[in-house]
Image: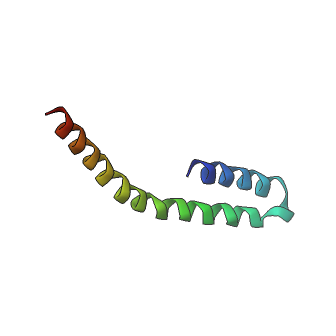
């Protein structure tokens, strides 16, 4: 996610530098859509994982 965000900023800088590279701005927008689409998926995987990890640690300590 961080790599995609940094890459989108690099693409935006390249698109802003020259009119001939304007297509890079559209690629940056597609990366942003990918990032926003992946956030709910990653939260759906991460939150249950954290809950299960806490339960296992509590069972080990008791």
Decide which of 57, 4 is in the foreground and name it.
57
Give me the residue at 53% from left, 59% from top: 35
Residue 11, position as x, y percentages in the image: 73, 55
Q: Identify which residue, 49 or 40, lies in the foreground.
A: 49
Residue found at the very far left of the displayed protein: 62
Left or right: 26 in relation to 42? right
Q: Is residue 28 left or right of residue 21?
A: left
Q: Residue 4's x, y, as percent? A: 62, 54
Above or below, comparing residue 59 to residue 6 in the picture: above
Between 45 and 62, which is closer to the camera in this rendering?
62
| The C terminus, quarter of image | top left
Q: Quadrant of residue 60?
A: top left
Total labels: the figure holds 0
Q: Is residue 11 left or right of residue 20?
A: left
- Toward the top, the furthest residue is 61
Q: Quadrant of residue 41?
A: bottom left
Q: Residue at x 36, y 52 (%)?
A: 46
**Picture residue at 82% right of the left edge, 52% below the top:** 17
Residue 4 vertical position relative to residue 21 in the rendered view, above or below: above
Q: Where is residue 40 drawn, in percent x and y?
A: 40, 60
């Amino acid at each position: 996610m961080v790599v995609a965000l940094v890459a989108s900023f690099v693409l935006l800088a390249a698109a802003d530098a020259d009119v001939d590279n304007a297509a890079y701005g559209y690629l940056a927008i597609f990366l942003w859509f990918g990032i926003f689409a992946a956030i709910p998926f990653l939260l759906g995987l991460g939150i249950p994982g954290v809950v299960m990890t806490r339960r296992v640690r509590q069972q080990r300590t008791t």
